[in-house]
Image (tube, grey):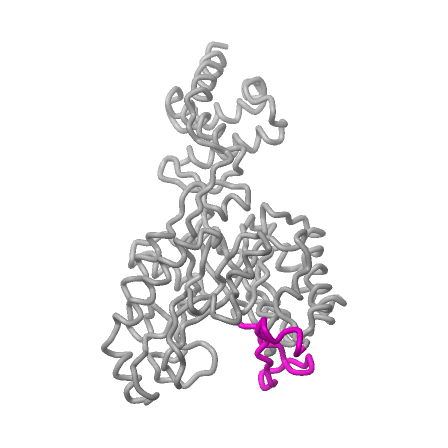
């Protein structure tokens, strides 16, 4: 009885002096990184060697294979329960019409079941860059909207909600629909800028939007290409994502949704004269400041554009230091063990986008990132203060791990928490106790 009285008095005092606001959120972006080879080990190595705690880890499964479920099962155990996972899954070669008809349902359902089973927080990007003309799912807004709504409803049927998964409608920074609405890697693309849209009757990303109910984030992909394999124009992040005639970022803001940069990267190669491969190799080898300068521009851009809640740096170089002549991924990487390259200004990007308890993305998931006893977990926002109160009382007044765990389990049935936190159900209170145990355990 005396113990219960102490608990009531102490928790009441803690409630009065608590300083954590449930509604507060940071406007700073959250930094993320793409695993170069889609492996957990790549991220583990980067975090260990550079003493980083990367808050968002990105994987792209395109096409999606049977290995996905196995990888998803290892994320929390190997990378931690305090990370957001940015996952792109595309429906292989299916068109949007076929997706809407259920041709890819089995794979989507397996993925959603894995998210729920493993209690992951996922930013989910599917059928991305639909406003381009390369992928089968693109260039047809009407069927795309049907497909998008169908996939989101599948997630709800599997028991997921915004607390588990955020649907990220990810567009290309340029609207490039295929002529005749027939997408392919070799299609003729229409430069559908705003001043010609009506005349050419070409769709832009606005036409694909399925409605506020079905979209949690507006995503965008953009790269700085310079002269890796030809004459490209260098641009700052602002110039690329808000280029005249497109104004992509300004248009994304009109949806009044948080904005996420799904892929961003820069080559290390630029010079004043016409493209020359040998010169590109020389610049790549010797002028690391070029990439570093752009990384600092990106950091300033992300800090200034407060509607952007997070960004994934695309840490991939399939050229292996320009040795491979690839189509697609260029020498984007900033920490590359294959070519032994490290661009230190990526650490500035990381420092500016470090995780905090109440980042905007956490707010969308209705969670906070809490650290107690050198342990970090996501806690449902409403649970955060009761967990901290209960943890403080338990570790202050109860000695010994066994006694602490017994005490916490006993609070589920003694009514003390129910009397103190009347707004919570018994199910909520039990979850608060279980969350507190995770911090108390050695």
Residue 379, percent from left and from top: 50, 39
* Residue at figure coordinates x 54%, y 19% from the top left: 420
Q: Is residue 106 above or below residue 363?
A: below
In this view, which residue lies farthest toward the right? Answer: 101
Secondary structure, magenta segment, majority class: loop
Q: Is residue 70 visible?
A: no
Residue 378, percent from left and from top: 48, 42
Front-lying residue, 369 or 39:
369
In this view, which residue lies farthest toward the top? Answer: 2
Residue 204, percent from left and from top: 62, 70
Q: Is residue 331 left or right of residue 50?
A: right
Q: Is residue 76 left or right of residue 293?
A: right
Q: Is residue 158 above or below residue 249?
A: above
Asked if the magenta segment contains residue 187, the reply would be yes
Front-lying residue, 10 or 414:
10
Front-lying residue, 43 or 153:
153
In this view, which residue lies farthest toward the left? Answer: 286
Question: In the figure, residue 202 lies in which quadrant?
Answer: bottom right
Residue 411, percent from left and from top: 53, 22
> Tag count in the figure?
0
Asked if the magenta segment contains residue 33, the reply would be no
* Residue at figure coordinates x 43%, y 17% from the top left: 13
Q: Is residue 154 visible?
A: yes
The C terminus sits in image quarter: top left
Question: In the figure, residue 398 lies in which quadrant?
Answer: top left
Instruction: State the extent of the magenta-drawn residues as a range.
Output: 174-200
Front-lying residue, 155 or 19:
19
């Amino acid at each position: 009885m005396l113990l219960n009285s102490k608990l009531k008095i102490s928790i009441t005092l803690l409630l009065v002096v608590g300083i954590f606001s449930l509604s507060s959120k940071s406007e700073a972006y959250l930094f993320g990184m793409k695993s170069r080879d889609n492996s957990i080990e790549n991220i583990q190595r980067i975090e260990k060697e550079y003493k980083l705690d990367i808050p968002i880890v990105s994987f792209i499964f395109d096409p999606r294979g049977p290995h996905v479920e196995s990888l998803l099962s290892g994320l929390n155990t190997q990378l931690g329960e305090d990370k957001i996972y940015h996952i792109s899954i595309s429906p292989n070669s299916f068109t949007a019409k076929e997706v809407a008809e259920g041709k890819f349902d089995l794979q989507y359902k397996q993925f959603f079941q894995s998210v729920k089973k493993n209690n992951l927080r996922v930013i989910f990007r599917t059928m991305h860059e639909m406003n381009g003309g390369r992928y089968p799912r693109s260039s047809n807004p009407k069927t795309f909207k049907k497909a998008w709504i169908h996939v989101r409803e599948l997630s709800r049927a599997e028991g997921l909600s915004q607390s588990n998964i955020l649907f990220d409608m990810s567009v290309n920074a340029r609207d490039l629909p295929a002529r005749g609405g027939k997408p392919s890697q070799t299609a003729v693309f229409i430069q559908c800028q705003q001043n010609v849209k009506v005349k050419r009757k070409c769709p832009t990303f606005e036409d694909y939007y399925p409605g506020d109910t079905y979209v949690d984030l507006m995503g965008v992909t953009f790269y700085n290409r310079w002269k890796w394999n030809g004459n490209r124009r260098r641009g700052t992040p602002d110039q690329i994502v808000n280029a005249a005639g497109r104004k992509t970022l300004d248009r994304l803001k009109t949806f009044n949704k948080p904005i996420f940069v799904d892929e961003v990267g820069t080559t290390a190669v630029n010079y004043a004269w016409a493209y020359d491969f040998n010169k590109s190799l020389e610049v790549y080898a010797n002028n690391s400041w070029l990439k570093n300068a752009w990384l600092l521009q990106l950091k300033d851009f992300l800090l200034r554009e407060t509607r952007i809640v997070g960004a994934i740096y695309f840490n991939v170089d399939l050229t292996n230091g320009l040795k491979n002549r690839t189509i697609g991924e260029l020498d984007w990487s900033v920490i590359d063990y294959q070519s032994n390259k490290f661009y230190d200004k990526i650490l500035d990007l990381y420092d500016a986008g470090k995780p905090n308890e109440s980042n905007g993305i956490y707010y969308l998931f209705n969670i906070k990132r809490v650290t107690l006893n050198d342990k970090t977990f996501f806690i449902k926002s409403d649970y955060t203060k009761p967990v901290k109160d209960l943890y403080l009382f338990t570790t202050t007044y109860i000695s010994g791990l066994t006694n602490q765990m017994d005490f916490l389990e006993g609070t589920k049935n003694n009514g003390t928490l129910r009397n103190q936190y009347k707004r919570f159900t018994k199910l909520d209170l039990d979850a608060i106790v279980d969350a507190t145990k995770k911090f108390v355990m050695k």
